[in-house]
Image: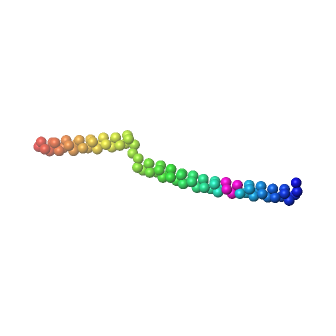
């Protein structure tokens, strides 16, 4: 094989590997960007859940407290009406 042909083959292979490397680097950058966006969205959802979500046990406890207060108010109203 002539040295010129070997040089062309080596140069072409190097250019191909460089092109593939750049393409993979661009692809990796895009995936990293999407991954970062997804992490941010997950973090936002977690913060929203912590802020807005109420546990069922807590809700039941609070409603029980409200019901007790309403019962006391009703009893007071009944007593005042009797008097």
- Quarter occupied by residue 81: top left
Q: Nearer the viewer, residue 22 or 46?
A: 22
Is residue 28 shown left or right of residue 4?
A: left
Residue 16 counted in the magenta span? no
Judged by its main secondary structure, the magenta piece is helix
* Above/below status of 20 relative to 74: below
Residue drawn at x 21%, y 44% as measured from the top left: 73
The N terminus appears in which quarter of the rendering?
Answer: bottom right
Q: Nearer the viewer, residue 58 or 80?
A: 58
What colouring style does the render use?
rainbow
Q: From which residue to which does the magenta span run? A: 20-24
Is residue 32 shown left or right of residue 5?
A: left
What count of labels does the image hold?
Answer: 0
* Above/below status of 73 relative to 9: above
Is residue 76 shown left or right of residue 59?
A: left
Residue 3 locus on image (x, y percent): 87, 57
Residue 45 locus on image (x, y percent): 47, 50
- Quarter occupied by residue 13: bottom right
Q: Nearer the viewer, residue 67 or 39?
A: 39
The C terminus appears in which quarter of the rendering?
Answer: top left
* Above/below status of 75 relative to 34: above
Residue 32 locus on image (x, y percent): 60, 53
Residue drawn at x 16%, y 42% as measured from the top left: 78
Residue 12 locus on image (x, y percent): 78, 57
Q: Residue furthest left?
A: 83
Residue drawn at x 40%, y 43% as measured from the top left: 55
Is residue 55 shown left or right of residue 4?
A: left
């Amino acid at each position: 094989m002539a040295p010129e042909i070997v040089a062309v083959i080596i140069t072409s292979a190097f250019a191909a590997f460089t092109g593939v490397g750049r393409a993979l680097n661009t692809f990796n950058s895009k995936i990293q960007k999407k991954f970062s966006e997804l992490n941010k969205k997950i973090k936002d959802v977690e913060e929203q859940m912590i802020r807005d979500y109420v546990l069922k046990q807590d809700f039941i406890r609070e409603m029980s407290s409200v019901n007790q207060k309403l019962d006391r108010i009703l009893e007071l109203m009944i007593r005042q009406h009797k008097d």
